[in-house]
Image (cartoon, helix red, strand yellow):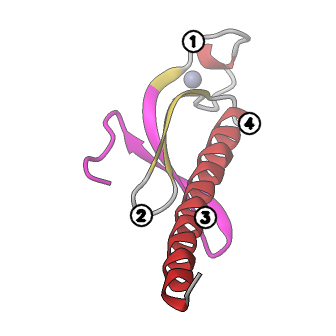
Amino acid sequence: MDSDGLKRRLEALWEERARIDAEIEQLESQLEARERAEKRGAEVLEVEPARGGGSYVLQKVKCGKPTCRCARPGGQLHGPYWYYYYRKDGKNRSKYVGKNRPEGV
Ligand SMILES: [Zn+2]
């Protein structure tokens, strides 16, 4: 391969690596979000990548009140509601979004 050919091949591989890295990051975020939601007793219905990083999760949740119907085994959960899961300063965070997922993010 001449040097132009080598450069073109390298550029193609760098692009492929960047694409794979981005997909890995996105899938890791989705897996982490799902596992964090389930650990809190939520039922996960959907997980979607957020454009700026992190994941949106549609989940049915426990409210935390010990006397609520959702606290009983097999009891009906609340929602579903969307939550945004993301990392900031190396920490996992999440915030309540609402009944509808924000558009275009
Ligand atoms: Zn409840």
Q: Distance between the residues labelled 3 and 2?
A: 15 Å
Answer with mark 1 or mark 4, whichever residue precedes in sequence. Answer: 4
Which residue position is annotated with label 2? Answer: 52
Q: What element carries label 2?
A: loop
Q: Which residue is farthest front?
A: 1
Please give left or right for residue 14 compared with residue 49 in the image.
right
Answer with mark 4 or mark 2, whichever residue precedes in sequence. Answer: 4
Quarter location, residue 6: bottom right
Q: Distance between the residues labelled 2 and 1?
A: 33 Å
Camera-side mark, 4 or 2: 2
Answer with mark 3 or mark 2, whichever residue precedes in sequence. Answer: 3
Tell me where residue 75 appears, x and y as whole percent: 63, 10
Q: Distance between the residues labelled 4 and 3?
A: 27 Å
Q: Which residue is farthest top?
A: 74
Tell me where residue 99 appears, x and y as whole percent: 34, 33
In magenta, the rendered stretch is 80-105
Answer with mark 1 or mark 3, whichever residue precedes in sequence. Answer: 3
Q: Which amino acid does label 1 sit on?
A: Gln
Camera-side mark, 4 or 3: 3
User: Which of the pair 55/92 is nearer the observer?
Assistant: 55
Q: Do the residues labelled 4 and 2 touch (CB within 8 Å)?
A: no
Which residue position is annotated with label 1? Answer: 76
Q: What residue type is labelled 2?
A: Gly
Q: How far apart are marks 4 and 2 (CA)?
A: 25 Å
Q: What secondary structure do most residues of the magenta stretch adopt?
A: strand
Which residue position is annotated with label 4? Answer: 39
Q: Which residue is pictured at 66% across the width and 52% down the height?
A: 28
